[in-house]
Image (spheres, rainbow, N blue to C red):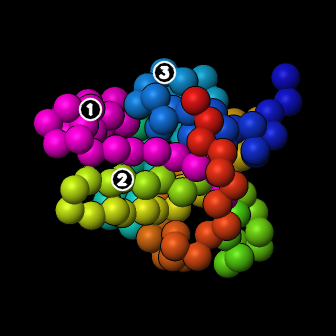
Amino acid sequence: MHFTEKYLLIQLAKTWNNLDASLIEHFLAEDFTYESQWVIAPIQGKDNFLPYLKSKFQAIETAIKNSGMKVYAELATHPDLYENECIVLTQTSMQEKVSVLIVIEVRSDQISRIDICFIPDPETTILSGIQPK
């Protein structure tokens, strides 16, 4: 089956909107790379990334229960990304609202790379209003 970049972005947004890593694991390449502008070193390999993501989701679920934090992923485009689609991931709490961009690379119908970025500025994206469940 052929998966488009948009389809894979929708699956990744569903993963975040449900805090469920199992929704994305079959769409990740074995030699997948995860890089974040907040993390010192990239995470190499699907087998290293999935436990990291599951742990992150557990921490978010705890914060949601304890503080009412909310997290949602929305499809978007960004002018600095040549209008390519991306995801804006937003975390809100009583104190603040923080948004980041999620950009993917696709190879052979699988996600080969995810980048989490605060540059370019997520606030200048064009939001679609679509938050896949």
Indicate the quadrant where residue 35 lies.
Answer: bottom left
Q: Residue at x 60, y 23 (%)?
A: 26
Q: Is residue 66 above or below residue 125?
A: above
Foreground disc of the pair 3, 1: 1
Q: Which residue is drawn at 67% across and 78% down?
A: 80
Which mark is on residue 61?
1
Amino acid type of the residue tagged 1 in the rendering: Glu
Around disc 3, counting alpha carbons within 10 Å, would you say few (fewer than 14), some (14 to 19), or many (20 or more)?
A: few
Mark earlier in primary sequence (3, 2): 3
Q: Is 83 part of what is drawn in magenta?
A: no
Around disc 2, counting alpha carbons within 10 Å, would you say few (fewer than 14), some (14 to 19), or many (20 or more)?
A: some
Amino acid type of the residue tagged 2 in the rendering: Gln
Q: Is 70 part of what is drawn in magenta?
A: yes
Q: Is residue 111 above or below residue 94?
A: above
Distance, label 3 to label 1, CA atoms, is: 16 Å
* Viewer-closest of 45 and 75: 75
Q: What residue is disc 2 on?
A: 91
* Viewer-closest of 118 and 40: 118
Distance, label 3 to label 2, CA atoms, is: 21 Å
Indicate the quadrant where residue 29 lies.
Answer: top right
Q: Which residue is drawn at 46% across and 45% down?
A: 72
Around disc 1, counting alpha carbons within 10 Å, would you say few (fewer than 14), some (14 to 19), or many (20 or more)?
A: some
Q: What residue is disc 3 on?
A: 22
Amino acid type of the residue tagged 3 in the rendering: Ser
